[in-house]
Amino acid sequence: MTTSELKKIAVKVRKGIITGTYHAKSGHPGGSLSSAEIFTYLYFNEMNIDPENPKDPDRDRFVLSKGHVAPGLYAVLAERGFFPAEDLTTLRHIGSYLQGHPDMKSTPGVDMSSGSLGQGFSAAVGMALAAKMDGKDYRVYSLAGDGEIQEGQIWEAAMFASTKNLDNLVLIVDNNNLQIDGEITWSSSPYPIDEKFAAFGFHVINIDGHDFDQIAAAFKEAREVKGKPVAIVAKTVKGKGVSYMENQAGWHGKAPNDEEYAIAMEELNKAEEALCQK
């Protein structure tokens, strides 16, 4: 897909995020919005997947390690055709297959149940190792939060991944610099993120996580790396695309009310219209 087409899809993904969290009256819009371009590029340009055959054994895998931003994953899965977009309004409702964290047993397109921070990346490492052991050429992608990488298990998994030369593994770090209680440096700073992953044996790529050209170049470079796992450190803006949510830690885990929902959707509709006129 072209950059122009991807930008339009990213806006639709953002609208899905706001729709889901609004109807749930709970959820995590901030980190979902900051990841919209990453989700969009993975599911529409990068990964070998088929909505008609979501359990294809040869498909690429994606593990949402920061599982609380499930609204973003669900929005892109719906846009990609894994399930109807209207089901996003059932987010977190009793009986819905779209729960607060991804559930691989009930949600089409979800490759791993996740939510306990730090653990999803370990599962992704295991999937990448399984591909190597089985002689398969599928690739494994995982998205982690910059606050999440304060978890020690992330670094245990990283050490193992480089030891096993898992060059079919790509970790994307959503570096929006905010977690539930403020800036990530206030609690336990993971900086410099790129140097840390390099020290753990990763090939590291730094990008603007909202720039599709940089995203495309990063994933192309990742495919060319041999003998090492790849870490893409994506600098992003928490709450990107909704003016009053941008760079506000308070929107980490809070749903918009009626007025806030209307404002967000108006802004996103205008952004979509502007892209359509180009």
Image (cartoon, grey):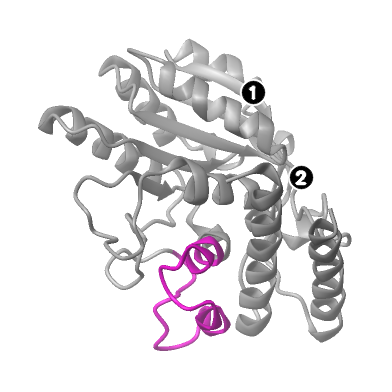
Which amino acid, mark 1? Asn
Q: Which mark is residue 206?
A: 1
**Residue 156: % across, % down:** 36, 27
Residue at point 51%, 60% (across, down): 73
Displayed quadrant of residue 116: bottom left
Q: Which mark is residue 155?
A: none
Asked whether 208 or 118 is in front, the reply is 208
Q: Start and end of the magenta stretch?
A: 74-101
Residue count near mark 1 (Cα–Cα under 10 Å), binned few <14, some 14–19, many ≥20? some
Q: Of helix, strand and loop, which one carries label 2?
A: loop
What residue would you read off at disc 2? 237
Work out which residue is located at the far front of the displayed protein and give it. 278
The answer to whether residue 79 is magenta is yes
Q: Position of residue 101 (x, y in %)?
A: 45, 65
Of residue 1 and residue 270, the one placed in the foreground of this image is: 1
Image coords of residue 104 (percent x, y): 31, 63
Image-based side of 86 in relation to 62, left or right:
right
Residue shown at the point (57%, 83%) measured from the top left: 89
| Residue 120 x/y as whole percent | 38, 46
